[in-house]
Image (spheres, rainbow, N blue to C red):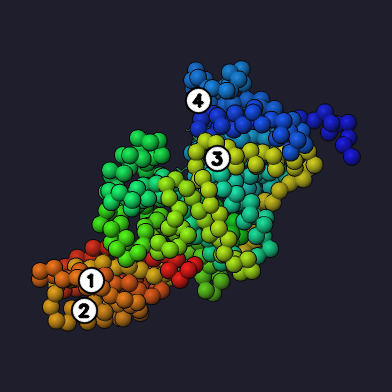
């Protein structure tokens, strides 16, 4: 039964940030307000939009609600404070102030969550408010709620996917056009996919932050950005892409979080990987994202869609706004942080996967045996070897069975100091070859 108080209730919403995502949240709130009200249970009223430059024209945002007093907005006691500023500060201080003022918070800020999610969660817990962040990973794709809720009855063993659209766009173009990294980066910047300073994307920081959030939810363990092994795509050359293509593979920047065999730890890593062209992730092109979750009872579940962009990300933000709004009206709360498993987050050396190793070696008797022995000495089993002669040298492409990352790294170190090995041309992890 609806009480008279509930019948008169509205849900006030404040936006901290009115840029790419914020402006789309404001537009959708305006254009779809009636539907959102029916779904949330009360009208949603946008009472303020906090920005840096109040003089900037902002299409579709009522100028009377635009302000540069972000702390005033954060502490205004709104039902829902939506943080879409980005970065660590002032976002963290503002979110904590909003929580202290009794507001529930919706944020898209993966950098902050991966750096200091624990502080935000603890504050929300203490204040009895919600902290929702679906938009922080993989834009429009519903992924965090399925992990937090739908898969809460299962045991996740692995999360693997493409969570950065900019790098996926660049790698897809390199594969399609045979172009080099720097050429495609310039094209990605001209098209607005890559930012003027692309470091966070191309060096893997953005994907690593998302991997930390995914791993934390999947394994009920606190995982921070610094726990994630990170390699970007700046070292991927047109030759690497061509070599992968020749072998029936494509290179993708993957985020992987896996439970160890002893089930007491996990490894979380972000790096370029070779993926068979027959694997569903190989077909994820351009700025799209896709994530596989492997759970004990469910088996494989795949999530796919637009991982970035104002409107897709705003869709995820508004899904959270509706969920949090419902809780405000009913006095309920969504799930808080779940870290009960407290697994050890282990170094990448403990990861177990397959590898591709490309070597330039002297073409003389015994060299292949020496190389093979070096792999054997480190317990790395060779799956196959391909040799191409060129003059006095030969190109050796070695593919391995699964091995520990630390063992492969030690093998490579030894090969580098072996006389017959002229150069280690390329080393890359191979994922998804066994259909996983
Ligand atoms: P953006 O276009 O740069 O917008 C940021 C907004 O915040 C702008 O309105 C800016 O004000 C305001 N702002 C930033 N710092 C401020 C400060 N110190 N004081 C006052 N206002 C400040 O960023 P965005 O692309 O919308 O991203 C917002 C958040 O969403 C980030 O956490 C990002 O990681 C996340 N996200 C973005 C995407 C995407 O595709 N863009 C996808 C998923 C998640 P002005 O307008 O005055 O400059
Ligand atoms: N820069 C990010 C990407 C935006 O390219 O995927 C979404 O987080």
- Disc nearer the start of the sequence (3/2): 3
Distance from disc 3 to disc 1, alpha carbons, whole Å, reads 45 Å
Classify 352 as above or below 76: below
Q: Position of residue 206 (x, y in %)?
A: 45, 47
Residue identifier under label 3: 312
Residue identifier under label 4: 52
Distance from disc 4 to disc 1, alpha carbons, whole Å, reads 56 Å
Identify which residue, 210 or 433, lies in the foreground. 433
User: Decide: marks 2, 4 in contact (CB < 8 A)?
Assistant: no
- SS category of the residue bearing label 3: helix
User: Decide: marks 4, 1 in contact (CB < 8 A)?
Assistant: no
Distance from disc 2 to disc 4, alpha carbons, whole Å, reads 62 Å
Residue in the picture at 67% in, 35% down = 80
Residue in the picture at 40% in, 35% down = 192
Q: Position of residue 183 (x, y in %)?
A: 28, 43
- 2 vs 151, left or right, is right
Disc sitting over residue 396 in the figure: 1
- Disc nearer the start of the sequence (3/1): 3
- SS category of the residue bearing label 1: strand
- Disc nearer the start of the sequence (2/4): 4
Q: Nearer the viewer, mark 2 or mark 4?
A: 2
Q: Is mark 1 within 8 Å of ligand 2?
A: no
Q: Position of residue 346 (x, y in %)?
A: 47, 65
Q: Is mark 3 within 8 Å of ligand 1?
A: yes
Q: Residues within 10 Å of mark 1 (few under 14, many from 20)?
A: many
- Disc nearer the start of the sequence (2/1): 2
Disc sitting over residue 246 in the figure: none
Residue identifier under label 2: 368
């Amino acid at each position: 039964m609806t009480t008279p108080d509930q019948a008169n209730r509205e849900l006030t919403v404040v936006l901290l940030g009115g840029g790419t995502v914020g402006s789309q949240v404001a537009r959708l709130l305006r254009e779809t307000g009636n539907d959102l009200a029916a779904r949330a249970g009360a009208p949603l009223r946008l009472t303020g939009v906090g920005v840096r430059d109040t003089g900037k024209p902002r299409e579709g945002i009522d100028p009377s609600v635009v302000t540069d007093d972000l702390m005033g907005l954060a502490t205004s006691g709104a039902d829902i404070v939506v943080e879409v500023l980005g970065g660590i500060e002032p976002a963290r201080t503002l979110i904590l102030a909003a929580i202290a003022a009794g507001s529930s918070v919706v944020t898209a800020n993966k950098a902050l969550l991966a750096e200091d999610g624990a502080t935000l969660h603890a504050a929300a817990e203490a204040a009895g408010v919600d902290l929702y962040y679906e938009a922080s990973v993989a834009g429009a794709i519903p992924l965090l709620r399925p992990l937090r809720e739908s898969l809460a009855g299962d045991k996740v063993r692995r999360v693997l996917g493409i969570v950065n659209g900019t790098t996926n766009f660049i790698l897809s173009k390199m594969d399609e056009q045979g172009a080099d990294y720097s050429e495609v980066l310039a094209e990605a910047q001209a098209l607005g996919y890559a930012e003027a300073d692309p470091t966070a994307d191309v060096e893997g920081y953005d994907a690593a932050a998302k991997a930390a959030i995914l791993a934390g939810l999947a394994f009920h363990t606190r995982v921070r950005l610094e726990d994630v092994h990170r390699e970007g795509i700046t070292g991927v050359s047109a030759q690497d892409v061509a070599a992968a293509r020749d072998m029936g593979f494509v290179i993708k920047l993957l985020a992987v979080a896996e439970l160890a065999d002893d089930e007491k730890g996990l490894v979380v890593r972000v790096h370029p990987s070779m993926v068979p062209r027959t694997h569903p992730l190989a077909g994820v092109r351009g700025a799209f994202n896709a994530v596989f979750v492997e759970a004990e009872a469910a088996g494989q579940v795949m999530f796919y869609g637009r991982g970035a962009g104002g409107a897709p990300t705003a869709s995820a933000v508004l899904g959270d706004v509706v969920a949090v709004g419902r809780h405000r009206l009913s006095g309920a709360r969504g799930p808080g942080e779940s870290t009960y498993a407290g697994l050890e987050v282990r170094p990448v050396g403990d990861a177990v996967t397959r590898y591709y190793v490309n070597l330039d070696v002297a073409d003389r008797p015994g060299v292949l045996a020496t190389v093979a022995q070096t792999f054997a000495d480190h317990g790395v089993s060779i799956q196959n070897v391909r040799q191409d002669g060129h003059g006095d040298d030969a190109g050796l492409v070695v593919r391995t069975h699964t091995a520990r990352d630390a063992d492969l790294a030690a093998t490579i170190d030894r090969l580098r100091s072996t006389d017959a090995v002229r150069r280690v041309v390329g080393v890359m992890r191979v994922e998804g070859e066994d259909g996983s």
